[in-house]
Amino acid sequence: MTKIDFGRTASDYARHRAGFPPLLLERLSTFGIGEAGQTVLDLGTGTGSLARLLAARGAVVTGLDPAEPLLEQARRLAREDGLEITFVTGEAERTGLPSAAFDVVTAGQCWHWFRAPEAAAEARRLLRPDGRIVIAHFDWLPLPGNVVEATERLILAHNPAWTLSGGTGMYPRWLADLRTAGFHDVETFSFDVDVPYTRDAWVGRIRASAGVAASLPAPAVERFSAELTALITEDRLTIPHRVWAVVADNGPAVP
């Protein structure tokens, strides 16, 4: 697939991509994650969906992303929500941030874009002893005959190099990434939710995906959007999604 640049679709990304549901933070709270005063680094923060949920619970959050256009949207959304979040430009594999500076490192909907061994090692460097890492996803589910399945077929017709179709919203490989890096007490959980979309919002959501506006030239994106709009016959859609997360512990300080 061609180079992915979500900065090219920052406006659609901020407007149409459904953020993580608050229930994710309720589940993470059972691990002691998201507490008031806790220092959190959100890798690949994008427009700050997960960062804002954490900050709303009182955590002291830094969001990091390589795409400045996404961070501009993240800053705007945080201001609109009355939240104080520090957003910085950088890469997950080499953040440039101080060692042992964070209680929690999160990565929402982005681990597959990282060089996993380097990102996991960097997360361990950034975490305090007994700090925790969270990798979370919020994926649409292509089920037989549903609009997601039809949408994925259309993406592939316009972009055969796209490799993310047919997902189940589960990522067992990330568990191996974390164990290999030295994390332990690895646990996972998942739950499904339905997300309402209008037809126009769904088209905007799909434009803001890796297989469309983040990788295709503008004329191809316009053709795709017109075809997807024509494909959908209903104005109100219910899109099944799966939330999946893995939590792991950094371990005690080494004497």
Image: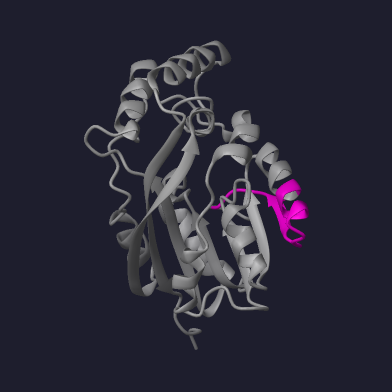
Q: Is residue 135 left or right of residue 56?
A: left
Residue 44 visible in the displayed image? yes
Q: Is residue 195 magenta?
A: no
Which of 204 and 69 lies nearest the eye of the viewer? 204
Where is residue 15, by image quadrant?
Answer: top right
Residue 154, above or below 96: above
Q: Is residue 48 left or right of residue 21?
A: right
Q: Is residue 77 magenta?
A: yes
Residue 61, above or below 46: below
Q: Is residue 43 left or right of residue 244?
A: right
Which of 69 and 121 lies nearest the eye of the viewer? 69
Which of 172 and 10 lies nearest the eye of the viewer? 10
Q: Residue furthest bottom?
A: 255
Q: Position of residue 222 (x, y in %)?
A: 54, 14
The residue under the point 34% across, 29% down is 152
Q: Position of residue 5 (x, y in %)?
A: 56, 31
Q: Is residue 139 left or right of residue 220?
A: left
Q: Quadrant of the N terminus?
A: top left
Residue 98 visible in the displayed image? no
Which of 91 and 12 lies nearest the eye of the viewer? 12
Q: Position of residue 210 (x, y in %)?
A: 47, 32
Q: Position of residue 27 (x, y in %)?
A: 44, 71
Residue range of the region highlighted in magenta in the rendering: 76-92
